[in-house]
Image (cartoon, rainbow, N blue to C red):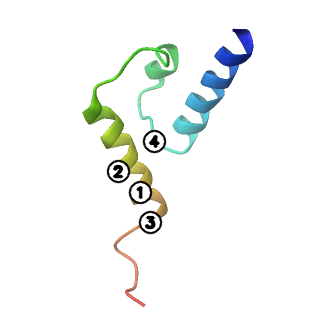
Amino acid sequence: MAVEDERIRMIGIMAREAGIIDDPGWLNRLTEPVPLWFVLEMMLKWIDRYDPQDGPFD
């Protein structure tokens, strides 16, 4: 399980560095279930970060 725990931690660190997770406290709780609204908020942040809507139309 140590390999799986390390993988989960790396995903958390990558999400924090990408700005998807704002609270560093989430890194200690990565295996806990989260509400659907939190998952959706993270996905919307990711979409906004990589597909900004305020750029030129063309």
Mark earlier in primary sequence (4, 1): 4
Residue 3 appears at what percent x and percent y? 74, 16
Mark earlier in primary sequence (3, 4): 4
Q: Do the residues labelled 1 and 3 touch (CB within 8 Å)?
A: yes
Residue displayed at 25% across by 35% down: 37
Q: Which amino acid does label 3 sit on?
A: Asp
Instruction: Kindly indicate the quadrant of the structure image that contains residue 32.
Output: top left
Mark earlier in primary sequence (2, 4): 4
Q: Are marks 2 and 1 in contact (CB under 8 Å)?
A: yes
> Mark 4 to mark 1: distance in Å?
10 Å
For label 2, the SS is: helix
Q: What residue is pinned by disc 1?
A: 47
| Viewer-closest of 5 and 28 | 5
Residue displayed at 60% across by 37% down: 14
Label 4: how many residues lie within 10 Å, few (<14), some (14-19) or many (20+)?
Answer: some
Q: Which amino acid does label 4 sit on?
A: Ile
Mark earlier in primary sequence (2, 3): 2
> Mark 1 to mark 3: distance in Å?
5 Å
- Residue extending farthest left: 37
**Quarter of the image that includes the C terminus:** bottom left
Q: What residue is pinned by disc 3?
A: 51
Q: What residue is pinned by disc 4?
A: 20
- Relative to 54, residue 36 above or below: above
Q: Are marks 3 and 4 in contact (CB under 8 Å)?
A: no
Q: How many marks?
A: 4
Between disc 2 and disc 4, the foreground one is 2
> Mark 2 to mark 3: distance in Å?
10 Å
Q: What residue is pinned by disc 2?
A: 44
> Mark 3 to mark 4: distance in Å?
14 Å
For label 3, the SS is: loop
